[in-house]
Image (cartoon, rainbow, N blue to C red):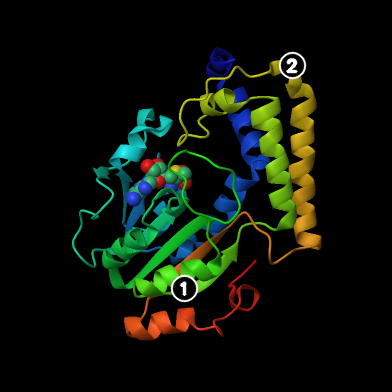
Amino acid sequence: MVLALKDFPAVGRAARATSDWIDLQWSLVIELLTRVAPQAHGRLLDVGCGDKPYEHLFRPYVSEYIGIEHEASFQATTAARATRGPDLLYDGRRLPFEDKSFDTVLNVQVLEHTPHPAALVAEMSRVLKDDGVLLLSAPFQFRLHEQPHDYYRYSPHGLRVLCAAAGLEVVEVHQQGSLWSVLAHKLNSYLAFRVARVGGLAQAMGKLPHEGRALARTRVWTLPFVAPMMLGLSGSARILDRIAPDDEETLGFLIVARRSKRSLAEHTAEALAPSAATFPDAKGSQ
Ligand SMILES: C[S@@+](CC[C@H](N)C(=O)[O-])C[C@H]1O[C@@H](n2cnc3c(N)ncnc32)[C@H](O)[C@@H]1O
């Protein structure tokens, strides 16, 4: 199957596009990043960049795109063997850059993988210029992955508190799909990984680069049943999320944060106040 995809690049591209569309986690993150990308500017640092899958979305808006990875966790992923990849590796403690050296920091699906998220947010804040912007996406509901380096899930309130403690103010919160995407994504994950066992096939198409190598053989005979079911579930979820959205269920959140002019104490107090804005009122979009 791997050979067949390599031998027929057009078929491989079509298969990849279809599987990206079915994969709600992936396609909804891409939709949100595309929406906020125009806010990126100047020098951009992609922290936990993996194989830099979002570079093409941001390139039109920035003068420089630098990707950095945590050396130990990155080396355990299949992305470490990809042709694209980080410009720098570091030890996961101090980002090797001067204070205030970037206009934009991008952090996509990384915060759940560090045992010390507050320290990472503080580092990203440190390297941001005063008028800089942090674009950060993190999961709220997602299966265990990249184990054992899968530590947390995030609500917008938790992200606001983490940002406040680092001197950043969350100015937009974007929801990554709603109830129907969550349900469809969970069913599709079960069909893909437990029934059809497509992990290896997905990696042959360049997907799941941050996970270890999938060893189970794909059950090819299940694909004629499983693939249409997955297509139907993703299509239905997209429609139902529009006509019957739910503010309290989502796969994840993407926040836009900027450096705050207020003192750290003021900021933290506001983020922790019982009256702090609830998500539906505070969100920038849905
Ligand atoms: C789920 S992958 C996401 C990769 C990429 N951002 C993407 O969305 O495709 C999580 C990545 O975070 C990296 N990571 C974990 N802890 C990190 C840290 N403290 N600093 C930078 N990267 C880290 C891992 O090596 C891994 O490549």
Give the percent coordinates (x, y) of residue 35: 55, 61
Q: CA distance from mark 1 to mark 2?
A: 48 Å
Residue 135 in sight from this viewpoint = yes
Q: Where residue 180 sits in the image (x, y, percent)?
A: 75, 53
Please identify the quarter of the rendering in which residue 201 is found: top right
Q: Which residue is mark 1?
A: 170
Measured from the top left, where is residue 205 in percent x and y? 54, 27
Observer-nearest of 120 and 200: 120
Is the residue marked by circle 1 packed among few (<14), some (14-19), or many (20+) residues within 10 Å? many
- Residue 226 pos. (x, y %): 76, 28
Left or right: where does residue 58 sit relative to residue 245? Answer: left
Please state which amino acid type lies under the numbered disc 2.
Trp
Q: Secondary structure at mark 1?
A: strand
Q: Does 15 sit left or right of 262 as displayed?
A: right
* Residue 221, label in figure: 2
Is residue 85 visible from the viewing direction of this image?
Answer: no
Q: Residue at x 56, y 60 (%)?
A: 253
Image quadrant occupied by the N terminus: top right
